[in-house]
Image (cartoon, rainbow, N blue to C red):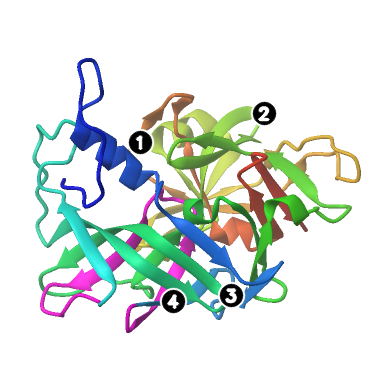
Amino acid sequence: MTCTRPCKAQGEGDIPESINCLLSFIDGRDQQLLIRSDVLSIPFRYPNRPTLDVRIGEHDFQFLLDSGTRLSILNLLASESKPTGLHFTGHDAFLADLDGKRELEYDDHHLRYAEAELLSSSDLRIRHLPLRTYVYEEQLPGTDFQGSLALQALRSCVVEVSNDELELRLHPLQNFQAPAGWYAVPLLQLHDKLLVQGRAGQGQPLLLMLDTGFSGELMLSGNCCSRLGNALEASGRQLDGFTGFHGSLNGEELLLDQFQLPVQDWPAMKGEGIDSGMLSVLALEGNLEQTALGELDGILGSGFLSRFNYAVDMSRSVLYLQE
């Protein structure tokens, strides 16, 4: 990948210049977040799926707020002209790993990295937003959204989602105070993932990724489903209406009637764990990736979060929930 911004010269023992540029780009070190009010409120239309109407250059898009990705995403058709205000910085053909030795190939699209000079939505402005762009040759994937704004891009704010009022609110870090009676769930941050630790069945631990881009309640890996055993009950239905950002997901539905999230015992916060009641589970045949904290057991999606009003504070590593 080439980088349009200057990098320091490589010296003996330094990280290669191309890797420095890549890390700087992925981490959004040049990004600038501008909010024109103390608390910015943005209405969203999709129940349970926080979205933003955004503009890049002269082009308008609807973006999904996505906690399951580190880089924001934009889907494009190869036959269409690229949006003004979008600057391609490199492509993915030799970037499967940082030193660029393993080539990636895709059947229906190619992946390029780009920077939005300015992404705007209401009174929100994000300059130099890093984007992963998927350029499709024939048609876009079956999703309602042409792009997603990574929750990580808003990490300098507390991001509140009011499902009661269908409103996204951005709070300056120093100004946010969770209302009394909310839950404070510990949030684990692992570079590009936001994780929570839950319990299911007879107290078996679960490591779950928080992913607002998945419309279902809970997705579990094959290994996890086997481990939970009788705690899961087959409903006899196939689930095919759930969507991730890149299209529809389908599989067998299982029901989980015992799922808990631990909470932090803070003043004015509710001190007991959250018992969610019955959850619909999309069961995967395969397994999910290994992380530094162990194998990922599943994904907690927006279908679960829609039961609550919630706020994500990445500076304090807390997920606040209000039933």
> Amino acid under label 1?
Asn
Quadrant of the rendered image containing residue 284: top left
Tell me which residue sits at (20%, 55%) in the image: 89
Task: Identify the residue position indicated by label 1 in the image.
Answer: 287
Task: Identify the residue position indicated by label 2 in the image.
Answer: 203
- The first of marks 3 and 1 along the sequence is 3
Tell me which residue sits at (75%, 43%) in the image: 184
Label drawn at residue 239? none
- Compare residues 201 and 274 and report the one nearer the observer: 274
Q: Are marks 2 and 3 in contact (CB under 8 Å)?
A: no
Label 1, label 4: how many angstroms apart (C-alpha)? Answer: 35 Å
Q: Are marks 3 and 4 in contact (CB under 8 Å)?
A: no
Camera-nearest label, 2 or 4: 4
Q: Secondary structure at mark 2?
A: loop
Camera-nearest label, 1 or 4: 4
**Residue 141 appears left or right of 45:** left
> Amino acid under label 2?
Gly
Q: Is residue 68 on the magenta stretch?
A: yes
- The first of marks 1 and 2 along the sequence is 2
Q: Magenta residues?
A: 57-83
| Other residues around mark 3 within 10 Å, as few (<14) / some (14–19) / many (≥20) | some
Tell me which residue sits at (86%, 45%) in the image: 269
Task: Identify the residue position indicated by label 3 in the image.
Answer: 47
**Quarter of the image that includes the N terminus:** top left
- Compare residues 45 and 25 and report the one nearer the observer: 25
**Residue 176 appears left or right of 229:** right
Q: Are marks 1 and 2 in contact (CB under 8 Å)?
A: no
Label 1, label 2: how many angstroms apart (C-alpha)? Answer: 21 Å
- The first of marks 1 and 4 along the sequence is 4
